[in-house]
Image: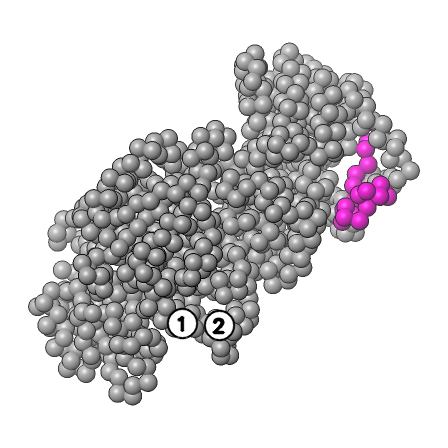
Amino acid sequence: MPGNPGTIDASAVELFKAKAKLATIVIAEVKDLAAAIDYAIEVTEKSELGKLMPTKAGTIPPSDPNRKKTLTAPSISDADYAVLAQKGEAKGFTMIRSGLRQYLAGIDVGFTVADIGIAETATSACENDSEDYRLASMISETHVLALAKSKIVKTSYDAVSYLKEAFGREHNYTSFISGPSRTADIERVLTLGVHGPLYMHIALMEE
Amino acid sequence: MAESMKNYHDSLKEALEDSFLRKTLDTFAVQYKVNRANIFADMNATELINEIADHKDKAMLKLDELYQQFVEQASKKGLHIHRASTAQEANDIICNIAKENNVKKIIKSKSMTAEETHVNHALEANGFEVVETDLGEWIIQLRHEGPTHMVMPAIHLSRYQVADTFSEATKQDQDSDIGKLVKVARYELRAHFADADMGISGANFAIADSGTIGICTNEGNGRLTTTLPRVHVAICGIDKIVPNIEDALRIIQVLPRNATAQAITTYVSWISGSSNCEINSDKRKIFHLVFLDNGRTSLLKDPKCGQALRCVRCGACANVCPVYRLVGGHKMGYVYIGAIGLILTYFFHGHDRAKNLIQNCINCHACKDICAAGIDLPGIIQEIRARLVEEEGSPISSTLLAKVMTNRKLFHTLLKFGKFAQKPMTSGKFVRHLPTIFAGDQSFRSLPAIASESFRDRFAKLNASAQGTPKVGIFAGCAQDFVYPEQLESAVKILQAKGAGVAFPYEQSCCGLPLQMMGEREAAKKTAKANVDAFSNSNVDYIVTLCASCASHMKDHYTELTGDDPSYKDKTAKYLSKLIDFSSLAKNVLKVTEDDFINRGAKVAYHSPCHLCRGLGVTKEPRELIGLAGEYVPTAEEDVCCGFGGTYTMKFPEISSTVLALKLKNVEEGSKDGIKPELLVTDCPGCIMQLRGGEHKHGDKVKVQHISEFLGHNLKSK
């Protein structure tokens, strides 16, 4: 793992923040994972109820007048999820932890935690072999990602040892994510949210 | 089916009349360069590109070994690997995978390799439903078109055309607002993602030491395509194999920056082995990888063109191509587009499809200058032209020219005869009436008259002293020897004023570039040797040429053109070491200063000749020289081609004239702060022919001069 646990490369963090702004990523600075969880709740609360898409059976019908906001976080620990679920349910959200394939019509907010950050491109990298983990960061209208400042390295080359370890596993799917889903395929006009999230937030954690 | 040249010209005209396409590509061409410069601002792009070229070359040398390593690593992780030697074989493999897995619907994320094999046709012919999920690819799939850009496949379409296409596809009226159109795609395609059985993706990298594939996308469709369906088939060329992650990361430093001026694509997915897939009984994805050869192995062994395999498919060669900018991708490639498209069409899709396309390169070197992998694209294009000539024989005009130009005396006699033959047609310095074979298409600019006395006939009368330091030999080049001798005379005047000795070896001939451009390889070799011989005994310190095209052709090709005769090895090296362009000689060797000139305050724009700024890398000196004897007025796109391109202007007048019009518009508009130039200075007689001829037709708003004329005119007499 790059970086020593607990030590923060302040210049890398500043670079990450500057590049994130260019990549239309909203940055929040929080104390720890508990605070990042609170931030995910806050973002969900403030987000508009997403317009869901018509798709095959098993998904929430788009016309359901009583539909509640949905929040998913398949990859965090049981204990962290318990905290998130309790807070989410208190706000009246539908909480989803697995089987995301059943929600392809869309989820309002997906919360994930990245393994490392690459400052020069505002990239968050994570091993996400679990399909639920991948889908949480793809089919949600808003993606909230937590990243420890101590895990931010300057360049992609600084992430080589992390990547080699990941690629060495029997099964591995590692993703670089550097902003909301984007396209410029029509008249070269930049448009966000073509297939994946329309919005991306990163909660940078001190701890 | 081979398209006739006439049909090709007709389709070019059609593209030139597409005002939406023209406007879009024009805006793109200008914005792209600014955006790219910004995104590379704090990096050394050249160094990075050289490293990529170097590593790609090394990887290609041990491709077999890397391939074996990849297979070994990836097989351990449950990846099924196939190798297809042809497009047909690849398609058969993919169709079989679909059949074996009882697939009905297939979704695809963007893959140029899949475009190369036309896999959609094969799958559809076998009864599978195929849906493209990249927005641009989906649009052109619905319209039954091919891509017009490797990265932005639907760049040729307006929002209104897309709205019409989507209205038809969804059977309801769709608004032309781009945000809403993107939502339509999101909704419609999400449903396809939900019930597709198989996903087909490309791969930007196949990493040998871990058996990992890497896929770059912005939209995220690549991630969904490789996540949702039970089966994933990736297809990639064997040239996409890299030794390790470092190589892939290095390419990612340049690929998105070059493609769309982004620091990185929004998503990069690294997949090693079969990933989690909840709907399969073992919860693992059925994962196949098809490596495509389709001519790559033989291209790899091709000493002159093999470097085309370095290509990382960024599409930048189209982004900066002045021809692409006018006619778009449907006319500037087949599947692959831009300069690399002309080349790969020849190697992957057959000589018939390539033979007209390959002629449509103006040789401005803009692509070579920007290529993410440092490929000598114009050099390979010229090589392919030579092979086509060897395969199919030369057109009569080209053979005749080759015969004439390899016989210096005959060539020069004909040029001298030309000045009499043109007599009834000339008016001052221009040809008044063109012979009917040129009239019409060539009338967009006046053509210069052949001078009444060539430089070689005038040189003796100049009484130039051969004594002096340094001793400078003049390489005249045909255009200045026979059409613009006054430009050379002006240079002689400056050389002598600065105390240099001047020599003019009479046995010199055409540099051979026109022959090279037409693929007349043997003739180009003969003229190269004649010129090296002409200067070998002249004992000069420098060989100066006032023609950037001659200079860059000699620098880039003489070593190779004379290389079949070992006795030329040292002679050619010596010749090239002495070769210098006029601006560099004046500024850096003669060290002219403002004291040498009377500065009359003339407002002077500059056209940066392709073969000077990119061919020789000279950009600073001419602008500084202008400042010594006038006021330099910067104008837009100074380094974009004037549209001449030697024989190109004769072959593609419809494009040449449009490129010229753009150039003159930029000059006449003046600088950003509204200063209008009265003079346009450049340092290549080919550009002068085009620019002066164009201005003549345009009412001579700006006077066009060679930099030697401009400086000579303002030189203080001693």
The chain under label 1 reads: B
Mark 2 vs 1: CB contact within 8 A: yes
Q: Residue furthest bottom?
A: A65
Q: Please tell me which residue is depicted at 49% across the width and 77% down the height of the picture.
A: B171
Q: Please tell me which residue is depicted at 20% across the width and 69% down the height of the picture.
A: A99
Q: For mark 1, does the 10 Å Cα neighbourhood hold few (<14), some (14 to 19), or many (20 or more) residues? A: some
The vertical placement of B65 against B138, above or below, is above
Q: Amino acid at mark 1?
A: Glu
Work out whether residue B205 or residue A124 is closer to the camera in this orientation and state it: B205
Q: Position of residue B55 (x, y in %)?
A: 36, 35
Q: Please tell me which residue is depicted at 30% across the width and 58% down the height of the picture.
A: B101
Q: Position of residue B311 (x, y in %)?
A: 44, 42
The chain under label 2 reads: B
Picture quadrant of residue B309:
top left
Residue B169: which numbered mark, if any? 2
Looking at the rendering, the stretch of residues picked out in magenta corresponds to: B432-453
Is B450 within the magenta? yes
User: In this image, B591 relative to A191: left or right?
Assistant: right
**Can residue B470 be seen by looking at this rendering?**
no
Q: Report the residue marked by disc 1.
A: B188
Residue B164: which numbered mark, if any? none
Q: Please tell me which residue is depicted at 11% across the width and 64% down the height of the picture.
A: A77
Dominant SS type (magenta): loop
Q: Position of residue A6 (x, y in %)?
A: 12, 54
Q: For mark 2, does the 10 Å Cα neighbourhood hold few (<14), some (14 to 19), or many (20 or more) residues? A: some
